[in-house]
Image (tube, coloured by chain):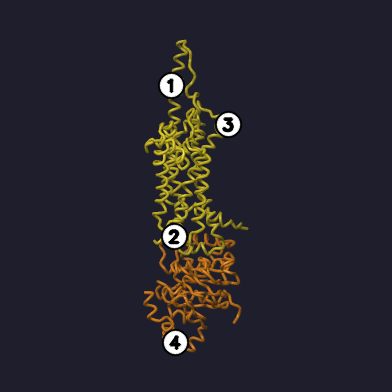
Chain colours: A yellow, B orange
């Protein structure tokens, strides 16, 4: 006998399938995976090169009877070779999440099926839960792919062997990356449901993403847009001026890209000694609060979406 | 009058100060094919949206198959099927894929078998594996009707079902409506402004003008009193005065 799946599961699975068929989503997801692969390859290549040079140098020094210094590859945490991944999560990962969130509800509105869905025997809350579950599943999938690539890189590098705690830190980094992408995905989902037109539904979250990624870091850390995407420069000390101290204190909690960089740096062991996030809310708590806010926005927008008149005028 | 399957009690809908449906009360017995007439903007679609729980009334309520639209929306949705004026479906999916999705959402057991059964019932198995994106208005209307009856509803709401159809399509749809009513005892609530269709299909009619109910009777009584289609048209026009219609236009 066929088991009847729940309405939430049906909406989630169907929506996820539709979104994966979208060319824009597929392209962005492919780009994200490619960039994550490139970042892993760059880290692997740099470490492997240093390791090769060290082995040659060590052999030479040994032959000439000189003392052999320790391998520099082993002096730093192996996790730090994944630091470029945080850049791609903040850039293409967040952007992919926005597009996924937007399309999850935008496809129903564009297809004009809301009245047919709205007359089925389940509540608006079930519809909202289904969409949020679909978003969660797709973002976890993206994060999981990034995690698998990172893990494969470590397994392929003989000189770099993370210990159990470092594997846990890597899992934490993947979790924080999923949380960061979820914030933007939820904003995309909420805006897709709340906006009257498809264009506005996409432009609003993209503008928010641009502001948080490129403008806020200028105010809170004196970073130019090009420096803002650098995983290291964000972690430099603040300029000694009252403006930057005040801006970092008060705008810091809203500077989510900064919070994500600090959280990632802590988890991937590349946060310089003596440097901490200047914001009064710890980075991880900040990201969790932002996720909660974004989820509330998405929930309200989805449960208030008119099933009678919510279709886009296409 | 037999027990009503639809019972509207002082139903009102106000949008930004504009009264779209004004104090609408009426009973519709089980098994009727009910024609809801009215000019454009009279409030017919708004009434259907309230009865199908797509919109909440500003005041008043209605019982659909014994369930209150305001307090028991899920039970109402289990009892109804709805075909909007312009049937829109997922264009990238086939008719069968669309129907299986809606069947599952309606909690239909063995959805594949039920979809096949409904497509056969509506004589449109030839559409089963075709993508909906390439369908004509008539084809969409058929699939729209199919999605509405998958879960065997007791009341079927059709919003301007013949709008945009050619004469062949209109006849085909009319035959389907009559068949669903005769074979399955489905009560049909149909919005329309086609007088000729009302006479051929409906067992009772009501006329809505500027949100108010101005006429409600059984079709036999109407034809006995007013005669053929032409007289019915005159009756309709007398109930929706031209002067008032020009305000709407």
How far apart marks 4 and 1 lie (CA) works out to: 100 Å
Judged from the image, the secondary structure of the residue bearing numbered disc 3 is helix
Relative height, residue B96 to residue A251 (above, below): below
Kindly check if marks 4 and 3 are in contact, taking CB atoms under 8 A apart as contact. Answer: no
Instruction: From the image, tell me which residue sits under label 4.
Output: B228
Visible in this render: residue A258? yes
Query: Is disc 1 in the same subunit as disc 2?
Result: yes
How far apart marks 3 and 1 lie (CA) works out to: 28 Å
Q: Nearer the viewer, mark 3 or mark 1?
A: 3
Instruction: From the image, tell me which residue sits under label 1.
Output: A53
Visible in this render: residue A147? no
How far apart marks 4 and 3 lie (CA) works out to: 88 Å
B170, B60: nearer the viewer: B60
Judged from the image, the secondary structure of the residue bearing numbered disc 2 is helix
Chain letter of the residue beneath label 2 in the structure image: A
Chain letter of the residue beneath label 4 in the structure image: B
Neighbours of disc 1 within 10 Å: few (<14), some (14-19), many (20+): few
Query: Is disc 3 in the same subunit as disc 2?
Result: yes
């Amino acid at each position: 006998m066929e088991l009847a799946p729940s309405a939430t599961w049906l909406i989630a699975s169907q929506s996820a399938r539709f979104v994966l068929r979208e060319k824009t989503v597929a392209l962005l997801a492919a780009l994200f995976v490619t960039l994550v692969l490139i970042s892993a390859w760059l880290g692997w290549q740099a470490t492997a090169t240093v390791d090769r040079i060290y082995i040659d140098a060590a052999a030479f020094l040994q032959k000439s009877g000189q003392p052999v210094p320790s391998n520099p590859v082993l002096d730093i945490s192996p996790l730090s070779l994944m630091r470029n991944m945080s850049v791609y999560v903040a850039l293409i990962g967040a952007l992919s999440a926005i597009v996924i969130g937007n399309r999850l509800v935008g496809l129903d509105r564009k297809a004009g099926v809301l009245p047919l869905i709205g007359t089925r025997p389940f509540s608006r809350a079930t519809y909202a839960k289904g969409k949020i579950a679909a978003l969660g599943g797709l973002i976890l999938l993206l994060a999981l792919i990034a995690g698998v690539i990172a893990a494969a890189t470590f397994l392929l590098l003989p000189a770099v062997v993370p210990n159990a705690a470092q594997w846990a830190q890597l899992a934490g980094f993947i979790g924080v990356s999923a949380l960061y992408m979820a914030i933007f995905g939820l904003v995309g989902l909420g805006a897709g449901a709340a906006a009257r037109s498809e264009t506005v539904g996409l432009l609003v979250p993209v503008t928010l993403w641009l502001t948080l990624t490129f403008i806020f870091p200028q105010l809170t850390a004196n970073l130019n847009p090009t420096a803002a995407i650098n995983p290291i420069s964000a972690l430099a000390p603040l300029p000694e001026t009252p403006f930057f101290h005040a801006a970092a204190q008060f705008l810091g909690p809203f500077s989510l890209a900064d919070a994500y960089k600090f959280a990632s740096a802590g988890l991937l062991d590349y946060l310089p000694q003596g440097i901490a996030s200047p914001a009064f809310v710890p980075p991880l708590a900040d990201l969790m609060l932002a996720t909660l806010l974004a989820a509330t926005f998405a929930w309200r927008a989805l449960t208030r979406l008119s099933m009678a008149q919510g279709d886009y005028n296409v | 009058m037999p027990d009503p399957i639809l019972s509207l009690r002082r139903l009102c809908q106000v949008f930004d100060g504009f009264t779209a449906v004004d104090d609408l009360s009426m009973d519709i017995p089980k098994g009727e094919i009910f024609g809801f007439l009215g000019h454009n903007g009279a409030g017919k679609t708004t009434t259907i949206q309230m009865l199908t729980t797509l919109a909440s009334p500003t005041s008043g309520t209605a019982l659909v198959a014994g369930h209150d639209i305001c307090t028991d929306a899920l039970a109402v949705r289990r009892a109804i099927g709805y075909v909007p004026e312009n049937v829109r479906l997922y264009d990238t999916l086939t008719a069968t894929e669309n129907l299986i999705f809606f069947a599952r959402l309606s909690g239909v057991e063995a959805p594949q078998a039920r979809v096949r059964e409904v497509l056969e019932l509506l004589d449109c198995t030839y559409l089963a594996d075709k993508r909906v994106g390439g369908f004509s208005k008539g084809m969409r209307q058929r699939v729209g009707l199919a999605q509405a009856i998958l879960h065997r509803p007791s009341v079927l709401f059709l919003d301007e079902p013949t709008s945009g159809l050619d004469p062949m399509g209109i006849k085909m749809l009319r035959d389907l409506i009559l068949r669903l009513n005769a074979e399955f005892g489905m009560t049909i609530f149909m919005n329309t402004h086609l007088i000729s269709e009302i006479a051929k299909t409906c067992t009772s009619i009501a006329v809505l003008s500027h949100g108010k109910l101005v006429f409600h009777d059984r079709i036999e009584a109407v034809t006995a009193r007013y005669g053929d289609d032409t007289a019915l048209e005159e009756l309709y026009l007398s109930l929706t005065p031209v002067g008032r219609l020009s305000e709407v236009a």
